[in-house]
Image (cartoon, rainbow, N blue to C red):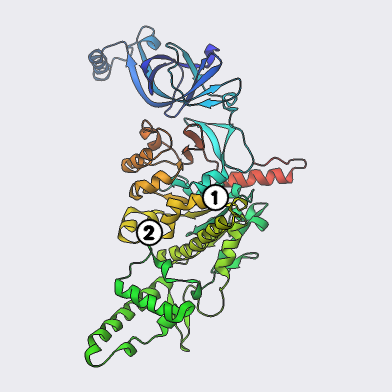
Amino acid sequence: MDDGLVVGQVVGGKFGDIIIRQKSGTDLEIGDIIVSEENGTYLVLQVFALQYGSQIQDRMQQMMSGVNMEQGVVDAQFYEPEFVNYVLARIKPLARIYRENGDVNIPKSLPPFFNKLRLITNDDLSFLQKEDDQIFVGYIRSGSKVIKEAQVWLPAQDVFSHHVLIPATTGRGKSNLVKTILWHMLDTNKVGALVLDAHDEYFGRNTLGLKDHPNARSNLVYYSPSNPPAGASRLTINLQSIKPEHFEGIVDFSDAQIQAIMTAYRNKRANWITEMMLTDPTALEMNGDSRRQGETAVSTMMVVQRKLRLMLSLEKDEEGRIYSRHEVFESTTRGIDTVNDIIQHISDGRVVVLDTSRLGDVAELLVGNIIATGLLQKYKDAKTTGELDRMPVATIVIEEAPRVIGEDVLTSKNDNIYATIAKEGRKFKVGLTAITQLSSVIPKTILANMNTKIILGNEMKQEREAIIASASQDLSEDDKNIASLDKGEAIITSIFVPFAMPVKIPLFEDVVKSRQQYITKPGKTRVF
């Protein structure tokens, strides 16, 4: 090895916690990836902690510091200081690579004692090869240094059917990451997605967005309740599409209220919501011995009507017709086929973005519940008929995931469709892409089912502990590493990657501009 490339040398430690002495003049960082050359193989290791080392005792150093500061001695010098004071790095093995065939194995041995180490290069990452139907996530990152030649691609069908978790605090680049993933999802018809866009930020009405993808016309479908742009559809869902089970795990109803709802559904079927909203509760009053029962029915009906009115923003006009203030839910004949159309788009491998920015939390989750329920049922039916293998994987992108898969939600309410998909959806090629700031409030059983985690920066220790405990690789020494992740820096831990990969997520705007440059230059056919 060229001594000019050396950054350190093995001086002790144990497996999983190897100690190296940093070479004078180099500057190792938390998260740096380094290489130990061995016979026919090389060991890939990562720095997880840094500390000072010295040949001078601590008490002597403290005395010298005091003399220097308190008495103003400025010419205190060490003889050959690079030998006296130095930095020690603690590193852990990530993978062992065999040069002959590029095989990647889990390391089970230590590097040779006193072996010299160097920073990783693009040539060491040649085993990262893009294959068909993969999704681009970012570039390999060593500390804060980005190796742009080493791109990280994930197998789309495997990753999204086995669920994805994107945990991070605010401002660490969650939305940028999701847009980048969806952008590359538009390159293939192998994955369909339902995106509940609570901030109307993914399509890009007035800025760069998914609409600027070359395949947007064929692979992207956008629904909005307010002035949809040319080529988009109005988000209108008929009240007849809503069934009582769609409220499960979303809204709390008492037993009496559930009974009233089920009675209305049995009597009126598709029109049950409209009929309930138009019913005069006082007409339910009874006389004689049934008076108390009648009063209870009146009270129950009034509470159910109030909940439906608040959740769905329903009002009654002067002519006695039911309408929705945010114009999403419709009581006439409009929007009858919207849910089925969306499900068909997803099962055709398209990305469907729903602008839910005008909806409240409950209404947004209800819309997702209606579509997700129908989608899972369609995929279950396809498995029964033997057609599932020919269908693309489907994923549901949900922000603030604890709203539907949080521990308090799932203990106080029945399992909703999101929890059902998290637990058994992969059998039917339906997955969740959950975005959250609070991983610790998601049950461990669901976290364990999220087989790919793209971890962005998080300063909250409780959240880091929850992520580390459920990671697909051993991240027990990465607590400080995760806390120090800057905006756009991430760690990918997944059963579909050979080791926990540190990556840099590119800016979405740069991704769009790069694609546009390739399209405009003659002879350029490379897919970014």
Secondary structure under the numbered disc 2 in the rendered image: loop
- Can you say whether 276 is above or below 63 in the image? below
The residue positioned 38% from the left and 59% from the top of the image is 415
* Mark 1 surroundings within 10 Å by alpha-carbon count, few (fewer than 14), some (14 through 19), many (20 or more): many
- Which of the image's four quarters has the C terminus? top right
Using residue 388 as the reference point, say whether residue 214 is left or right of it. Answer: right
Residue 389: image tag: none
* Image vertical order of residue 174 relative to residue 38, above or below: below
How far apart in space, not on screen, are marks 2 and 1 (Cα)?
29 Å
Which quarter of the rendering shows the N terminus?
top right
Q: Mark 2 or 1 closer to N-term?
A: 1
Q: Is any atom of residue 208 visible in this view?
A: no
Query: Dot 2: few (<14), some (14–19), or many (≥20) neighbours within 10 Å?
Result: some
Where in the figure is residue 396, as x and y percent of width and height?
Answer: 50, 55
Residue in the foreground of this view, choosing between 403 and 336: 336
Furthest-front residue in view? Answer: 385
The relative height of residue 74 versus residue 130 in the rendered view (above or below) is above
Residue occupying image coordinates x 41% and y 55%: 419
**Looking at the image, which is closer to me, 474 or 503?**
474
Query: In the figure, 387 relative to 58: above or below?
Result: below
Kind of residue at badge 2: Asp
Q: Nearer the viewer, mark 2 or mark 1?
A: 2
Find residue 247 and report its horizontal and vertical position in percent.
40, 67
Element under disc 1: helix
Mark 1 is on which residue type? Lys
Q: Residue 187 or 414: which is nearer the viewer? A: 414
| Circles 2, 1 touching at the beta carbon (< 8 Å) | no
Query: Which residue was labeled with disc 2?
Result: 415
**Residue 209, position in %: x, y?**
59, 53
Residue found farthest to the bottom? 288
Q: Mark on residue 179?
A: 1
